[in-house]
Image (cartoon, coloured by chain):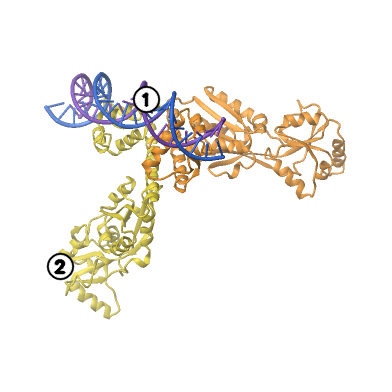
Chain colours: A orange, B yellow, C blue, D purple
Amino acid sequence: MNFQQLRIIRETVRSNFNLTEVANKLFTSQSGVSKHIKDLEDELGIELFERKGKRLLGMTAPGRELAKIVDRMLLDSQNIKKLAEQYSQQDQGNLTVATTHTQARYVLPPIVAKFRQQYPKVKLHLHQGSPQEIAQMLLAGEADIGIATETIGNVEGLLTFPFHSWHHAVIVPAGHALEKQVAKLHKSGKQLTLAAIAAYPLITYHSGFTGRASIEKAFQEAGLAPEIVLSALDADVIKSYVELGMGIGIVASMAFNAERDLNLHRLDCSHLFPANLTRIAVREGQLQRHFADHFIALCAPQNVAKSD
Amino acid sequence: MNFQQLRIIRETVRSNFNLTEVANKLFTSQSGVSKHIKDLEDELGIELFERKGKRLLGMTAPGRELAKIVDRMLLDSQNIKKLAEQYSQQDQGNLTVATTHTQARYVLPPIVAKFRQQYPKVKLHLHQGSPQEIAQMLLAGEADIGIATETIGNVEGLLTFPFHSWHHAVIVPAGHALEKQVAKLHKSGKQLTLAAIAAYPLITYHSGFTGRASIEKAFQEAGLAPEIVLSALDADVIKSYVELGMGIGIVASMAFNAERDLNLHRLDCSHLFPANLTRIAVREGQLQRHFADHFIALCAPQNVAKSD
DNA sequence: GATGCTTACGATACCCGTAAAGATA
DNA sequence: TATCTTTACGGGTATCGTAAGCATC
């Protein structure tokens, strides 16, 4: 048994049992991959993979159990390397943060700026993706820290803790009818309603992103079925189309900047949609460079711009 | 990094940083050991061992942390082998039980007999040692199951659960004065006292064995300092000297067999000494063959002979 | 002087990649 | 036929053990 064999086992699972792909990912030859698997199976005296003729289709029962252990071992092997870097190059190295557009664009900048000041020699990698992709990157060891709002909370193998809580807000073109409506309501001591919002065509996030689920839930519970004319990955795109007059937008409230978004106005609706909790996630059992812990420490409340 | 290097790191710690010894233990050459350590240190870019000139004296801080991870990895590598055996040879293999004389001689026989019936192809290895040695064997992976009474409960890295609870008993030569004394006490509804026992020279276990600590504690709390004229590792030895009239014995009550020990009588003293809890221990994180789990299951209360 | 670690060097075994053959869709 | 896996084989590399050199006690 050697590490190359273990890497091959892990990569075979990840690559859906296509050994050619495994060879490419690990920068080695197909034949070597094949032989390594055979050698390991011979050494252990058990079949690890289900085969139909020469094709691999999946794992056997012992194979699945072995894969779990292999994952742990390779994680530990990574931990050894991280440990060594920790001591040999105190404040140097790489930190990969996987996050969504919203966080990267509107929440993380001040934190990243502070971090760079403290660790000028650390190379920061900011990866953008969906919450699912972020979880995958963490589990595969491709990212050190993940930050996302949905789903990330209950992924097996991840350790998460709260980062910050925020609300959605409605954005409208300056002078929009809804804006006047809100002004009137305020005078009589009332607030904006979901029904009033649902009367207009909406532009908001793709499902799975930035609290889209909580928006849908709020409307559904109110018995409303608003027309969502456009969905996008990020608030910048949404704002562009709101400016064009295609509809009113629902975005994370911190995505609105009064100084820059001169053609838009923000309407508070923290009473309409439930608060969203953005979480920080790391892979369970993975050793973190000390500056990674420091990055997480920087994500304390006082460094997060108030958005409501 | 390869497994041989990891094995060498682990063995170096275990062998007190004597590389010659490491080489012998791992059946390889000194020079190879030396080179492997150097290679690993070079690869990681850190010193793992404290050196004085050419001698290794101990570990550096990163070395100590690395050793922990290495232990985990090698444990997992063992787990992979166990897993493979599990599937390739269902009911074959080896089971090493480390225990003390008392358990091996008076408690385990019926359990071992049942086990052999169920798994005739499993080779059982019964290792005897002190509780400390038992813990060491478990932690080093040399034994699968440990059974002992003292200290084993709070050893880091071991998982323990209760096996059975038992009391000490006093044994005396047939017709001994203490025996008559007890008979009298019984008639007036009274019981044997510690003071009555302490009046005679005592023969019991070595300290660290079979509840010796709880015996001492009981006397001490009663303000008594009995004379222990002989201490031994096991009840058989103790009984021999009690028969010779050297003193009265205090042994685990299950060590007395009325049918065999015709020259001795047992006096109940479950009210004088606290109960002793014998525990079963396994190494934390170590995969167990399924017949090992079965062995533990056999240690259920109904299979343990009542001793009080 | 005895023990213990390191370095040098030659033999061996292992790992890798190319190429050809066989199997599957 | 195109894709994929296995087997065979030659070249290269890494590992191992012997032996010599050199510290430490």
Viewer-side residue, B98 vs D11: D11
The amino acid at mark 1 is: Asp
Q: Position of residue A3 (x, y in %)?
A: 41, 34
Do the residues at pointers 1 and 2 share their chain?
Answer: yes
Q: Position of residue A121 (x, y in %)?
A: 52, 22
User: Is A264 situated left or right of C25 in this image?
Assistant: right
Amino acid carrying mark 2 in the image: Glu
- Image: A126 above or below A190: above
* Residue in the foreground of this view, choosing between A133 and B10: A133
The quadrant in which the N terminus of chain B is found is top left
Q: Chain of mark 1?
A: B
Determine the CA span between mark 1 and mark 2: 66 Å
Q: Residue at x 86, y 42 (%)?
A: A185
Residue B243 bears which disc, if any? Answer: 2
Q: Earlier in the sequence, mark 1 or mark 2?
A: 1
Q: Which residue is mark 1?
A: B42
Label annotation for residue B228: none
Q: For mark 1, give the secondary structure.
A: helix
Q: Secondary structure at mark 2?
A: helix
User: Is B135 in front, or is D14?
Assistant: D14
Residue A286 visible in rendering: no
Left/right of residue A303 with respect to residue A51 in the rendered view:
right
Give the image location of residue A18, x and y in percent: 52, 36
Density class for disc 1 (Cα within 10 Å; few <14, some 14-19, many ≥20) is few
Residue at coordinates 76% horizontally, 50% vertically from top-left?
A221
Q: Chain of mark 2?
A: B
